[in-house]
Amino acid sequence: MNRISSQYNNTNTQYFLRQQEVRQAQKNAQIGSQSRLGALRDDPIAAGHLVRYQSFLSRVNVFEKNAQTLADNFQLREGYIHQNVEIMQKVRELAVQGANGTYTPQDLKNMSVQVDELLKELIQNANAVGPDGNSLFAGTRNNVTSFEISMGDVEGASEPLITHVAYNGNIEANKVEVDEQAYLEVENSGNKIFWAEPQVLMGQRDLSSWQAQEDSVIYLDGVDIRINRGDNIYAVAAKINDSGVAVKASIDPLSRGLNLRTTDAHQMWLADKSGSVLEQIGMIKDKSQLPPYNIGTSVNISGGSLFDTVIALRDALLSGNQEAIGSRVLGTIDEGMNNLTTRLAKSGSDYERAQNNIQRQSLNNLNVTNLVSREGDIDMTEAITDLKMLDYVHQATLSTAGRLYSSTLLDYVR
């Protein structure tokens, strides 16, 4: 039972008018924000889903940007490698011409001038810098020049020429996330891309009686290999072969020294991460020397870079050594071109994979955006219809209230 008083009509009307105004304000806020969730209490379950969907959508956007950045980088890198393939083809043509025995020593010297210019172009491309100012072929040391040249006197030349090209980068690779727990590896090591033939290190120290004095870790081509106290040189070779790196170890039957040979064309990277195993067996110098130019002085090294190959061709042309051009030099040029072509194919494959990730994340973006819209967006047609209905009810309530305000308590006394 309600108590009837003179203020009853006014109080009751004001109460329901405020409720209608609150509903109108909520509907206006939803239309203004285009979201049906103004607060978590509006729909707790939908709000929980919406938060998760929005979080995932932000990650999808980051994944798509990462993949796009990688695709741009791979495409740019592929262009420079392709140019170097064309340069090496021209170098090979000159090598074939110089080895056929029909040219005079002066002709060969003239050819050497063109080879030297091609060498400079080769180095220029290897030292390429991306639009962000980072070196493309220096590993993760992208703030340095990838390759440093040394000038010197060459027999038959009238001025100093390039005699050595040293790698300044490293062999580390970046992993960039392009999907949930999925990564693309970015490997820009110049001493792999611009290498000509497998490298061989032949140790000359007799290690038949050597044993590790402590637990140690050696670093070989980016992989840590643990050496236990008491391991002999045969155990070390076995652990290297079982490590999965592209290097095979063996013991020389004559010198009893450790031999290391890469299974593909790249420069070996050796270091003692803890302990001094590699230093003890004479494969590297002391720890003050950094790879890749820390190989021990007693170690015989074979296998060079593309630059070494072109330098050898130029020097052979200058000296008129046609026999060297047609045998050793031409063979290493072919090996270098094969490796460069392989690296070019790898770069193209990386680009295609990045493009696939861009397409997948673009589709994920669309799908997740639909989920966000389903849980959080308002149906504008329905919302406007509801707002108009609320406004109609509000006007009707005001009209009714105007007729009720003239009533008094005497109207209820009969």
Image (cartoon, helix red, strand yellow):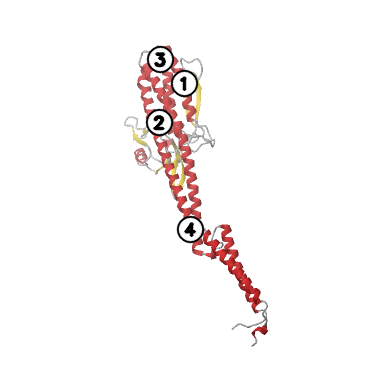
Instruction: Indicate which disc residue 340 carries.
Output: 2
Instruction: Indicate which disc residue 374 carries.
Output: 4
Q: Is residue 7 left or right of residue 127?
A: right
Judging depth in this view, the residue of 393 and 137 nearest the camera is: 393
The residue carrying pointer 3 sits among few (fewer than 14), some (14 to 19) or many (20 or more) residues within 10 Å by Cα, namely many
* Amino acid type assigned to the residue bearing label 4 in the image: Arg
Q: Are marks 4 and 2 in contact (CB under 8 Å)?
A: no
Q: Which residue is mark 3?
A: 320
Q: Is residue 281 above or below residue 226?
A: above
Q: Earlier in the sequence, mark 4 or mark 1?
A: 1
Q: CA distance from mark 2 to mark 1?
A: 19 Å
* Amino acid type assigned to the residue bearing label 2 in the image: Leu
Report x, y in % for residue 81.
44, 31
Mark in front: 3 vs 1:
1
Residue beneath the point at 32% across and 29% down = 254
Q: Is residue 237 left or right of residue 382?
A: left
* Amino acid type assigned to the residue bearing label 3 in the image: Gly
Q: Which residue is mark 1?
A: 116
